[in-house]
Image (tube, helix red, strand yellow):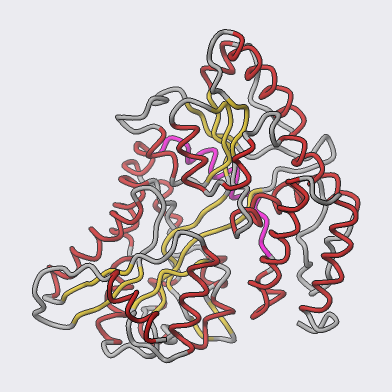
Amino acid sequence: MAGLCAIIVALLLTASPAVGATVTLACSGLGIAADLCRDGAQAWARNTGNEVRFVSPPKGAGEQLALYQQLLAAGSADIDVFQIDVVWPGILGNYFVDLKDHVDPQILDRHLPAMVEAATVKGRLVGLPWFADVGLLYVRKDLLDAHHRPIPETWDELEDTAALIQRAERAAGNDRLWGYVWQGRAYEGLTVNALEWIASRNGGTIVDPAGTITIDNPRAAEALTAAHAWVGAISPPGVLNYMEEEARGVFQSGNAVFMRNWPYAWTLVDGPDSPVRGKVAVAPLPKGGADGRHAATLGGQMLAVSKFSAHIPEAVDLARHLTDLAEQKRRAIHGGANPTIPSLYEDPDVLAANPFLGELAKAVGNTVNRPAQATGMRYNQVSAEFSATVHEILTGRRGAKEALADLDRALVRVSRGGRW
């Protein structure tokens, strides 16, 4: 544990000399999100006379969760405020302060009910909603227009359009262009992508809300087999090691027709220095066929306060500040972060900065939840088993039917025979 604490100390970036309390914030983020977090926290520090120090955790969600579990299980006070994924409250909630007595109920009622529900574990409010996420399809509209192709409605249409444009553009000299980039590394991002593929074909959600394991079914196998065929065809072989930023880098450099990513990427791909500025549209992810559905995984982040903190009142105040309406509006305008406060979706300033919010509203209406509530403390094990199995299928090391049958048996063991 001493070595781990030394790593944390090395990551701390000190602000101005302390006047009041020193609150340490674990502030992860994609793209410019980390800078937005830092700016908001430093504004709070200036206004309150406190100091904020920042920890930059690992990029991958799995690595972040492992680090947080080690620190919290040891009772460490190194971090006061944690940025946590929407699927982590059931895993980490026992280590966090119950915020119900620290937040005005009327303020809490402003947030999306689904996010508040996700932050509540056994009646305890263990996090404050910070931003919501859904998977989106980013489209090079200029290339679709040039090749007279509509935005695809199904995955088969996406594959056909991606292949056609990739082939034509390469023949014209753009030999670095790929059809579709996404998150294919064996981590939580692959769980999210694969769940969207499977749910879009009505293949379930790995484990259903009642706790029944459903992954071993023909529609799920069909979805994963189709995705395997993309690798090396319309998707670069390296996609199997991509996370969000790797996919964005390829797309933003002008080397992909389609990209699956979170809304944060919009501000960057349409930014002043982006090579594809003004050429990109956003759409719902495709359906899994004529009888399928649009399916976008619900994501998001919350802020939680460690019960081991030496500065709980100040830490709670920082979390309230970062999740309030004014700060969520600032983050939406400057970073494309989706508010958890619905009224901001009608704010003229937010709408002017985020023209894709209309498509985002459609995606929010087609969300699919990861099975975090059904699997509770074991969700991380479920996700790790799932993403590892999907990765084996995508690499061609195993066939989907055989791999999913083995995954089903593995999840039965994880669930202790279905008793989550």
Above or below 313: residue 49: above
Q: Is 195 left, or right, of 134 in this rendering?
A: right
**Measured from the top left, where is residue 98 in percent x and y?**
44, 86
Report the number of numbered marks: 0
- Report the front residue among 332 and 410: 410
Query: In which quadrant is the C terminus drawn?
Result: bottom right
**Measured from the top left, where is residue 414 in percent x and y?**
77, 78
Question: Which residue occupies 59% across, 79% down?
Answer: 90
- Report the front residue among 190 and 388: 388
Query: In which quadrant is the N terminus drawn?
Result: bottom left
Q: Does the magenta stretch include residue 366?
A: yes
Q: Residue furthest top?
A: 172
Dividing the picture into quadrants, the one containing residue 313 is bottom left
Question: Which residue occupies 74% across, 27% down?
Answer: 157
Above or below 368: residue 280: above
**Measured from the top left, where is residue 408 in percent x and y?**
85, 67
Give, as a single range, the part of the protein colored magenta: 354-370
Above or below 60: residue 241: above
Question: Which residue occupies 63% across, 12% down?
Answer: 168
Question: Which residue occupies 74% across, 23% down?
Answer: 160
- Report the front residue among 224 and 337: 224
Q: Is 104 left, or right, of 211 in this rendering?
A: left
Dividing the picture into quadrants, the one containing residue 97 is bottom left
Dividing the picture into quadrants, the one containing residue 290 is top right
**Measured from the top left, where is residue 172 in percent x and y?**
57, 8
Q: Is 186 left, or right, of 138 in this rendering?
A: right
Q: Is residue 405 magenta?
A: no
